[in-house]
Image (spheres, rainbow, N blue to C red):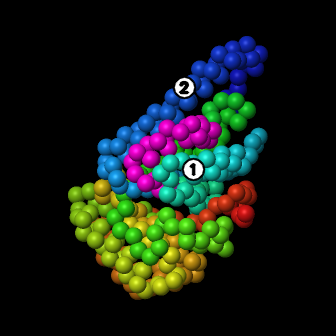
Amino acid sequence: MIGVDSDREAARGTKGESIVGTFITRLAVCALALLSLTARALAADGDTVYDITHFDVLPVTSPFDSEQIAYSALFNYRDASATDQGSESFRIVNWLAATNHSFIIDVWKNRQAFEAHLAQPHSVAFRFAVQLLSGPDSGCCIGSPIDDRQYSQVKSFATPFVSPQIPQTVGPAGALFVITYVDFLVDGDPGNGQNQLVQYGAVTADANGPHLLSFTVLQQLDRHNRYVLLEVWDSAASYNAWNSSPMTAEFVNGVTPLLGSQLDTRLNSLCGETYVDGTGCTPP
């Protein structure tokens, strides 16, 4: 931390805090405005919008508990957003390999609903709360910029991701939420790549019966060569068995020559109301 003259800072006090606070708030508003412009330019009015946000929280550090501050804000944001008009689903999932990381997966009826959500005070307040640059929690709470991307649905198999039938059990004992980022070469053949993703989704659904709860192929709105596979499995054991199968190996071998970067897969569990430092999301 950079040292400051406390007496001089106290004398400046309110004015300095006001300037910094106004500046940060404007940054948050500008960021939300850019998200809105992306959705407006690229999503058709009636299309469902999937919004996936990578949320990287600083590990616990002195003198404040960044994880508790950030996850409290995150859970409050989810709860406030769930009643926004046009919200079809709003889940937080916790990355099992690095529990200070989570993903917000929210789904909106259409572009207008997503834009209205972005304009809500709780949307701006959340981003402001976890990016504090002044005050007693200076430096809290995120370890990297919030990575927020919007998608349209290409194809869905098994139970729709937005369905309330998707299990709500919190923590690793519940369903496994799998997010795989797929980046095809821009000057390659993304169309062929998309077809292979859809074919793999159909094969996965047919081969796994009740173990695969949901499989959705998504295309990023502003980068049409980028996709996400959004899967929900009844358990990690079921996913691991399929992931090591010859059919999955055949899919990976077929799609790899089309990729601009390796498949990036994150295994996650559902978050509820409790986050334990160093452990992740736990019941309830």
Point 75% across, 42% down: residue? 64
Q: What residue is pinned by disc 1?
A: 83
> Residue 156, percent across and down?
39, 70
Who is closer to the viewer here, 112 or 30? 112
Q: What whole-number distance in Å separates the C-alpha atoms at marks 2 and 1? A: 29 Å
Q: Secondary structure at mark 1?
A: loop
Q: Magenta stretch containing residue 111, yes or no?
A: yes
- Left/right of residue 68 with respect to residue 161 in the rendered view: right
Instruction: Examine the rendered structure and indicate whether residue 241 appears above or below residue 96.
Output: below
Residue drawn at 60 percent across, 26 percent down: 21
Residue 13 in percent (x, y) is at 70, 17
Residue 92 visible somewhere in the drawing? yes
Q: Amino acid at mark 2?
A: Phe
- What secondary structure is the magenta-colored segment mainly? helix
Q: Amino acid at mark 1?
A: Thr
| Residue at the disc numbered 2 | 23
Between 136 and 155, the one lying in front of the other is: 155
- Which image quarter: residue 205? bottom left
* Mark 2 surroundings: few (<14), some (14-19) or many (≥20) residues within 10 A: few
Q: Quadrant of the N terminus?
A: top right
- Apparent side of residue 42 relative to residue 62 in the rendered image (left or right): left
What stretch of residues is rendered in magenta? 106-131
